[in-house]
Image (cartoon, grey):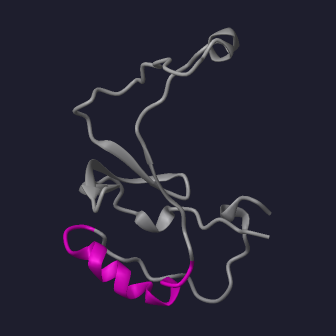
Amino acid sequence: MSDMSEAPMLGAPAEAVDLSGNGLHEAANHYRFLADIPVRLSVEVGSASLRLAEIMELAEGSVVELDRQANELLDINVNGTLVARGEVVTVDGRFGIRVAEVVTKNVGQARVERRV
């Protein structure tokens, strides 16, 4: 079963957790036992649709215009699920992301990827 919604439910249903306001912090405490599960956080700068011919013509120095304005917040994804938006910062010469807004009330919906 690849779809988590098809997985059989074991035991009693999980208790609903309020994720509004300070609820996000409370939810983190509620799910503390999951804290050691690795997840993949990625930041999407933008995207573009190109024809294959345009891709094949790309060379060093080529510029591809993306679909996002330079001043827009960037999407922060956890395992492919949008959970927040933020802005780029630098930390000791490396890129970082400052969270500006949490997008989803149900951060718990971020998929946990199975690695074989």
Residue 35 at x, y percent in the picture: 48, 84
Q: Position of residue 11 (x, y in %)?
A: 64, 89
Residue placed most toward the observer, 109 or 95: 95
Q: Is residue 90 left or right of residue 32?
A: left
Image check: 49 left or right of 51? left
The spot of residue 87 in percent (x, y) is 26, 47
Which residue sits at x=45%, y=18%?
63
Q: Position of residue 49 (x, y in %)?
A: 55, 19
Res 94 → quadrant:
bottom left
Above or below for 77 versus 111: above
The residue lying toward the viewer, choosing from 41 and 106, is 41
Residue 3 forms part of the magenta stretch:
no
Location of residue 99 with respect to 38 vertically, above or below: above
Q: Is residue 114 above or below residue 62?
A: below
**Image quadrant containing the N terminus:** bottom right
The residue shown at (24%, 67%) is 20
- Can you say whether 59 is above or below 2 in the image? above
- Please identify the quarter of the rendering in which residue 66 is found: top left
Q: Which residue is more in the foreground, 65 or 58? A: 58
In the picture, the quarter occupied by the C terminus is bottom right
For the record, the magenta segment spans 20-37
Is residue 35 magenta-colored?
Answer: yes
Most prominent secondary structure in the magenta stretch?
Answer: helix
Q: How many marks?
A: 0
Say which quarter of the image contains residue 26: bottom left
